[in-house]
Amino acid sequence: MIVDSAPAFDVRDYLRLEMMPHFLCPGCGHGIALRALLWAIHELGIDRDKLAVVSGIGCAGRLSAYIDANTFHVTHGRPLAYATGLALARPDLHVVVITGDGDCLAIGGNHLIHACRRNLKLTCLMLNNEVYGMTGGQVSPTTSETRLTTTTPLGNSEPNFDACALAAAAGASFVGREVTHHVPKLKELIRAGMEHPGFAFVEVLSDCTEIFGRKNELGSSAEMVLRQKSDLRPSAYRDTVDTPFRSNDLPTGILTKIERPEYGAAYRKAAAAQRASEAAKASAGANKGNT
Amino acid sequence: MNAVDTALAPKIPDSPKGAARLISGNHACALGAVAAGCRFFAGYPITPSSEVAERLSRLLPEVDGVFVQMEDEIASIAAVIGASMGGVKALTATSGPGFSLKQENIGYAAGAEIPCVIVNVMRGGPSTGMPTRPAQGDIMQARWGSHGDYPIIVLAPASVREIYDETIRAFDLAETLRTPVVLLYDQVIAQLTETVELSDAKDHAHAERKWASGPREAYQPYAADEDGIPAMSRPGAGYRVHTTGLNHAENGFPTQNPEAVARNLGRLLTKFDRHRDAIDSWQTLACDDAEVLIVAIGISARAATRAIDIARARGVRLGLFRPITLWPFPEKALREVAARARAVLVPEMNAGQLSLEVERILGGKRVDAIHRFNGEPITPAEIAERAESLAKGALGKDTR
């Protein structure tokens, strides 16, 4: 049980209620992820005036508009690059990126690996629903093999990305994964990511019930979420239609946590040292001139 | 002190002030940016603009600014817009291929009204083209390169000193009018080294963005004042607004309501109208009695300046109209100046871009052009010769 001195969490305190009703489909896991994020923010006691949420394009990208904070809905695939500029220019802000599997791993893949390498303090929340939902259900870099989508009518024949393995390989100093079924655990993971003094990559296994689930006859949203709980550990890349939904050997929890210099602080430190050195030289030169 | 002495002096403080200095156009751009208050640069290496980045990687840490080399061209403009969203003046620099890659996000900055400055050093094109050769083939792209309708300001300096001054003006216009501003100059001007005397450069009073004030409840992030420019809010100031590339209403949230879109996009598309006095800039040379008027930018305008002397020595009265603000084009000024000339000549290093705009503005006027796209600048003699034959009534197009 979590004992916290903060007042009880009420998600409505963190939402732009005037934006309700939201536009997510019934059964979509993204709302659960949003709630977990806001819960983590609540527990951390982050001042919403100092919270900046940058999101890309797609179903996940639309979530920023619902958060009562400084929110930036930018171009497709680029939220990490926008967030890099924002966080470097404004180290006083808490910068969170919300992105999807297509936004983050396909069109934005280059920004992801370099954000992992750079280790600027940012929290990247990637909501993985295995599909381009906003555009009607096309195959994404995380769609399991053999799955049906509107652009894989014969079944997906491309292997999918393990986003966390990718992030870790690219040097991310914090990597974690959780499912929307386990809301408190997801909140804890996001909180740990936001507390991490560097780049944190958090993958959330979400569900697209309406489009992906329907197309692949995966049952109701409740059934899809329950399967997250029971069937997480089997083998990923030898998936077949007969195996359960997302029957991937995808571990959850904190998968990587290492200490590395945070980019923004390291840059500022080097710049301050250079300025001090120049000032000392100038002062020595001036003294010499006076004698 | 002459230029060579200055260049060889053992220690030149990297400050714009002081004695005459021999510097390149790209170096002048970096100095101008710092003088204008730019404190963020993100870029990606590309010839022939990389010297802007290299200079700023040294200059910005000195003034507590941030330089970052991003993973690609798109990330660079994205980081620049992100920094500006945080309230910091920001710059990126690129050339042709990189400028193409940046276009989507330039449209975002125009639509969401995020100030930023983009340097595009024009090199040969299309595609990879001729990276080390000059061209002026991005005149239309600078105006129309992103999808949809949007306003943008493009400045076209023609000397090292003018790059310094126009870089400062680019930031002033970007900040006060909440718009991306493109600094467009060709490879020759970028890498040309000229002696510049910056001691007469005024201490620049930084033009500031109009920041939101008053209670949060009353603030509408895209509700403009009389001047057509909405006040911006800085993250941390308590306004907590939403910024999006979707068409939005005054409250900043996405809308597809036809009236709201027409109203807000309509305001965006006309927001420069009341500020043309500050935006428009041009130079005229020997125009009072000119029978043939040359309209040119960048290195072609430099050649035209010399061509005027050559032609006038032969009795052909030549004049030059040089737009310094290229977009929006100072068309009123051009119409007035051109009214006195019998014919107009547009020498440009492309297959015909500036000439299209000049023809449009001067509908019915005789407009001839020299179009050159082989990487060799147009020479003064060529311009003088063509102007002379034009004065004598001959017409024709040179597309060597």
Image (tube, rainbow, N blue to C red):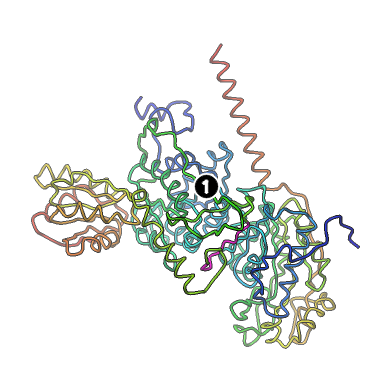
Q: Nearer the viewer, residue B164 or A248?
A: B164
- Amino acid type of the residue that numbered disc 1 sits on in the rendered structure: Lys
Q: B128 left or right of A129?
A: left
Percent position (x, y) of residue A140? Answer: 64, 75
Quadrant for residue A67, please give it: bottom right
In front here: B114 or B106? Answer: B114
Q: Chain of mark 1?
A: B
Circle 1 is placed at which residue position?
A: B89
Q: In the figure, is residue A290 to the left or right of B192?
A: right
- For the residue carrying disc 1, how many other residues have a C-alpha within 10 Å: few (<14), some (14-19), or many (20+)? many
- Residue B330 included in the magenta stretch of the image: no
- Locate the N terminus of chain B by quadrant: top left
Give the magenta part as a residue range.
B240-248
Q: Dot 1: what SS? A: loop
- Rendering coords of residue A221 (x, y %): 76, 82
> Does A267 appear above or below B342?
above
Can the viewer see residue A119? Answer: no
Principal SS element in the magenta part?
Answer: loop
Q: Could you tell me which residue is drawn at 63 percent across and 77 percent down?
A: A133
The C terminus of chain B - image quarter: bottom left
Q: Decide which of B46, B179 is in the foreground and name it.
A: B179
Residue furthest top in the image: A291
Q: Determine the residue positioned at 77% across, 54% down.
A: A45
Q: Is residue A153 visible?
A: yes
B204 with respect to B378 (left or right): right
